Image (tube, helix red, strand yellow):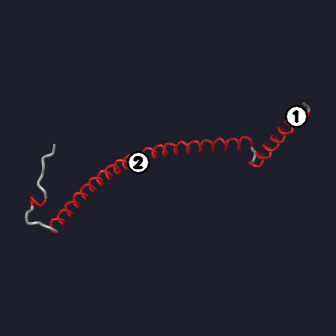
Amino acid sequence: MRPTTATTAQRYPGLTGRGLDAYSNANLVERENDEMVRALIGDVRALKQRTRAMGTEVKRHNSFLDVMRGQFESTTSALGRVMGKLNHAGGWSSMAHLWLLFLFAFAVFVFIYLMLKLR
């Protein structure tokens, strides 16, 4: 059990009436301010921890993206070399590849049409 403390009037016998009320109000406001400051400090600490965690996560993601960028660059260059070799070996231009693709697709559609028609 808490020991009883003296009232404000008992601690400060010179304060009476409005002076006592003003002192009590100021004391109450000061206690409320102290509680709010403690709550604010707790919120700041929590925010600081979350910010640090976010920073760690961002660094981890950035390193992952750097690895992916390197892999994409190597894949792009490898595909470019393969396409260059195919173009050089076949001696065809890209337009010839498109026409060949078009003819192949047309032949497939004709084949499917005939299969469905003769069923």
| Image side of residue 107 versus residue 78, left or right | right
Which type of secondary structure does the marked residue at label 1 adopt? helix
Name the residue at 54% across, 42% down: 71
Q: Tell me, for residue 48, which label it has, or none.
A: none
To which residue does mark 2 refer?
Answer: 54
Whether tag 2 and tag 1 are in contact, CB under 8 A, the answer is no
Q: Nearer the viewer, residue 5 or 64?
A: 5
Which disc is residue 116 wearing?
1
Would residue 34 be found to the left or right of residue 7 on screen?
right
Give the alpha-carbon distance from disc 2 to disc 1, as whole Å. 59 Å
Quadrant assignment for the C terminus: top right
Tell me where residue 109 sits by quadrant: top right
- Direction left: furthest residue: 13
What secondary structure is found at the residue carrying circle 2? helix
- What type is the residue that disc 2 sits on? Met
Residue found 58% across the figure and 42% down from its top:
75
- Counting from the top left corner in percent of width and height, residue 92 is at 76, 45
Q: How many marks?
A: 2
Q: Classify residue 72 by image quadrant.
A: top right
Image quadrant assignment for residue 77: top right
Q: Give percent across and percent down for residue 7.
A: 13, 57
- Mark with earlier residue (2, 1): 2
The amino acid pointed to by label 1 is: Leu
Q: Position of residue 41 (x, y in %)?
A: 29, 53
